[in-house]
Image: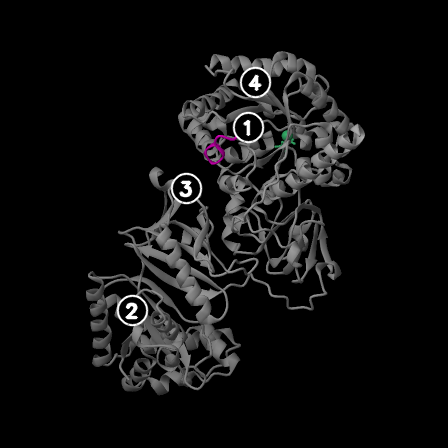
Amino acid sequence: MDAVVWLEEVGKEDLATVGGKGASLGEMINIGVPVPGGFAVTAQAFRDFITRSGISKKLFESLEVDVNDQAQLLKAEADAKKLIMDAKVPKDIEKAIRSRYEELCKREGKEVFVAVRSSATAEDLPTASFAGQQETYLNMRGADNVFEAVRKCWASLYGARAIFYRVEQGFAHEKVNLSAIVQKMVDSEKSGVMFSSQPSTGEPLVVIEAAWGLGEAVVSGSVSPDNYVVDRVKKTVESKFIAAKEIMIIRDPKTLKTVTIKVPPKKKEAVVLTEDEILQLAKYAEILEKHYGIPQDIEWGVEKNKIYILQSRPITTIHKAKKPAAETAESGKVLVNGLGASPGMASGIVRIITSAKDLSKIQQGDIMVTKMTMPDMVPGMRRAGAIVTDEGGMACHAAIVSRELGCPAVVGTKKATSVLKDGMEVTVDGRKGIVFEGRMTVPEAAKPAAASGPLTMITKPITATEIKVNISEPDRASAAAATLADGVGLLRIEHMILGLGKTPNWYIKNEKTDEYIDELIKGIKTVADAFYPRPVWVRTLDAPTDEFRAMEGGEGEPIEHNPMLGWRGIRRDLTETAHFRLEVRAFKKLHEMGLDNVGIMLPMVQHVKELKAAKSIMIQEGLDLEKIDLGIMVETPGAALTIEDFIDEGLNFVSFGTNDLTQYTLAVDRNNENVAGLYTELHPAILKQIEYVVERCSEAGVKTSICGQAGSYPEMAKRLVEIGITSISANIDAVAVVRETVARAEKIMMLRALRDKN
Ligand code: PEP
Ligand code: MG
């Protein structure tokens, strides 16, 4: 047997020669999957080295220790490793390794960086896996370094952990060999991961995530990647979602260390993969799934227009029912209760997250458990199978974003982060608000519609009442537009601003207001473009002081006794007019860019003088109020009960913010889990105010809408149609249901009217 073999010369039958890793790489090349090229220093070369160098006897004697005695184990490691590193490698073996590396460089046309990986194999049990026991050396270049790394891999066969493992598992040290795999490092210009089947439902859809630079950015979740879905049956790209990719990880050519840099502005919102690359990747995903017989989670990279498959392993998130189908979550043990904030059920592994720094813990489909989500946690929320929080009510950040992402969520459990433990398997029922112990059979109908899933064909009933959609994260714009909604009834900008990490005041203090305006424009434009010419009502800033305090520039935020009743919304913008003016300038620019579908909506208004003051600033800033849709949110009883004054002052629309209108009418803090049981938008006092406002507005020709969570409840939607509302704005996942409810309600009203007439 040769001391070295090219990877393409080996296959699955060569386990004894090149170990599991080498055999699998060879096999992939042979079935047409482009893995980075390289060679293996065979297990026989290693065995030859030990025998011919004369260290064999001494080596195996040094391993005869009590592995449960830490001191003895560490001494065995030190002795064995020293023997390997000091021994002379026979000239022919050394020469074979060096010259094969040089040949590899010739093949690649330059002195390549390689990874030197250990691939251990047992002589009498070649299928045994020693994965992760031995070392890997990355970024090696030059024959000397490569040769040295191979010797280190050999030595790593005698690491303490590996020795302990073999004794525990009953493997004789003498029968275990090591092949060193020397493989070209791919310096990806773009990279990512893909799933050969839809990871939560198992449908034949390849889901690809892609970003610029090396793959760590996507794998660790530090960047929001593009997302593409390919229908494996039709061989077509079903959906493309282009994310704003803020950062990228590259290898510093000098230090060889990976560094995180900002994505150049031009590439930030550019599509990462071409249509051909997407389809080609999907093809490889299909080949790999077929080859391994189960859906695969694959890492890939593209270097100089060539695709490389870097790793493939089974997806662990498609949960085939392990238990009898009759056992649904209803019969399981309840671990914690909370509010069912986003419907759907999912099983997975608990990951406790204390800050955005922990996000890399979350793999696709894991259950994210945290006190409360923050805007910088959204990349992790995208990967989560479900979200569970200690704090919050139906309108908290976790609830709003989960619904938008189509991810089941239970909020306000008070104790999830202490009761649930990292690594636990649980089932989350986001409709009932329960977390059950263990993995349970999730009924097909209860599975969440995957946020990244295909854009399903929508047969859209025509309704007289317009059905709109709410958006908080601009990168959900294409998913929102795919609902065929009649417009955006609420675009919240505070999630976008809180995501910047710096308060608006920081930008003002540091004289970077242009940067701030650009950020506003960028986020709003994404949505306005996706919906054009359908109207997009953008709400001016409405972030409570406690949310700003954690941000750079938020140090001086006042500590308020009750931030919900405090300095937020229009009342803050009218005292800190410098900030409000920046928002107005952004609106002005958007209109100048031709985005005349952008409307302005003012939050937390309670007296007509606030509308008057806001209008006067807008006029001072040169906004043409004749050409722009301007409205207020009706979310205080103050505004609802004096709506005539607003109509007299002049406005184009009102929109019910029932999340707040409910808390201010019923005196129930929407973020306080202790009073969550009292919180209901269907309270007659709320409905009375809505009815009153709609009547006054209808008489005056002012449009009426709802953008609070209640608009997504079919029961409320039906009542609103009967009351005569002009439009209903629902969450992305609720648009279809609300539309159907509204269509039915309208038909019933027409039938009733006809019958009454006859
Ligand atoms: C509301 O209050 O109903 C609303 C939509 O605004 P937010 O939830 O952002 O306060
Ligand atoms: Mg509100």
Q: Earlier in the sequence, mark 1 or mark 4?
A: 1
Residue type for callout 4? Leu
**In the image, residue 688 above or below residue 547:** above
Q: Within 8 Å: ligand 1 and the Cβ of disc 2?
A: no
- Residue stretch rendered in magenta on the structure: 528-538
385, above or below 479, in the image: below
Asked whether, in this view, residue 110 is left or right of residue 415, the answer is left
Question: In this rendering, would 177 be left or right of 254?
Answer: right
User: Disc 2 versus disc 1: distance between alpha carbons?
Assistant: 56 Å
Per the image, label 3 sits on a secondary structure element best described as loop
Which amino acid, by three-letter code, is at mark 3? Glu
Residue type, label 2: Gly
Residue assigned mark 4: 574
Depth check, front residue: 758 or 384: 758
* Frontmost residue, 460 versus 301: 460
Residue annotated with mark 2: 38
C-alpha separation, residue under disc 1 versus residue under disc 4: 20 Å
- Residue 754 drawn at (x, y percent): 76, 31
Q: Nearer the viewer, mark 3 or mark 1?
A: 1
Magenta stretch contains residue 645: no
User: Residue at point 42% right, 25% down?
Assistant: 594
Q: Are marks 3 and 1 in contact (CB under 8 Å)?
A: no
Tell me the amino acid under the disc marked 1: Trp
Task: Please indicate whether residue 98 sits to the left or right of residue 706 in the image.
Answer: left
Q: Are marks 2 and 1 in contact (CB under 8 Å)?
A: no
Quarter of the image containing the N terminus?
bottom left
Circle 1 residue: 537
